[in-house]
Amino acid sequence: MLIIERDVKTLVRLTSELARRGLRAQTAADLDEALETLRDEGEGCALVLLATQMPGERTCDTIRALLAATPEPHPAVALLHQSPDADPRLQGCHTGGTLAWLATPVAPEALNALLANVLGTTSRED
């Protein structure tokens, strides 16, 4: 898993939630860090959690760059957002490799559903 997010609170919350489920997450603050992380340690990366950026087209460009830089099978991409209606251009990202939208702060139930979809297993919440 790779989390691309600048907000430290969100990063800590998500990495803790994933660790509780026995999953390891890499983190990156921006596209350059994400590409470096994927190049160096990204083998088998199944999921990218990407914080939306303004303007929305930057988010779509980031998704395209990530998918272009990763070998098949590409990781699934889920967008972390405050409000999906903030920029209508974000709606176009849904067809560009985006699997899901997760409102922040991410609800444990939403994370469980996403992980079950991506990993094909149910996540436990101890």
Image (cartoon, helix red, strand yellow):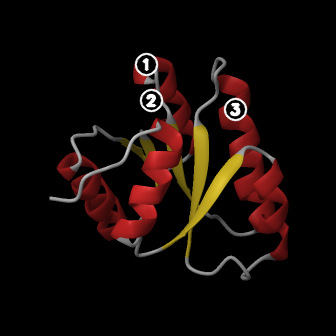
Residue 23 or residue 5, whichever sits in front: 23
- Residue density around tag 2, few if under 14, some if 14–19, many if 20 or more, within 10 Å: some
- Residue density around tag 3, few if under 14, some if 14–19, many if 20 or more, within 10 Å: some
27 horizontally vs 12: left or right: right
Q: Amino acid at mark 2?
A: Thr
- Residue matched to label 2: 37
Q: Position of residue 103 (x, y in %)?
A: 52, 74
Query: In the figure, 8 relative to 123: above or below?
Result: below
Q: Secondary structure at mark 1?
A: helix
Mark 1–mark 2 contact, CB under 8 Å? yes
- Residue matched to label 1: 40
Residue 23 or residue 30, whichever sits in front: 23
Give the CA distance from mark 3 to mark 1.
16 Å
Residue 6 or residue 45, whichever sits in front: 45
Q: Position of residue 55 (x, y in %)?
A: 75, 68
Query: In the figure, 83 relative to 113: above or below?
Result: below
Q: Residue at x 39, y 57 (%)?
A: 112
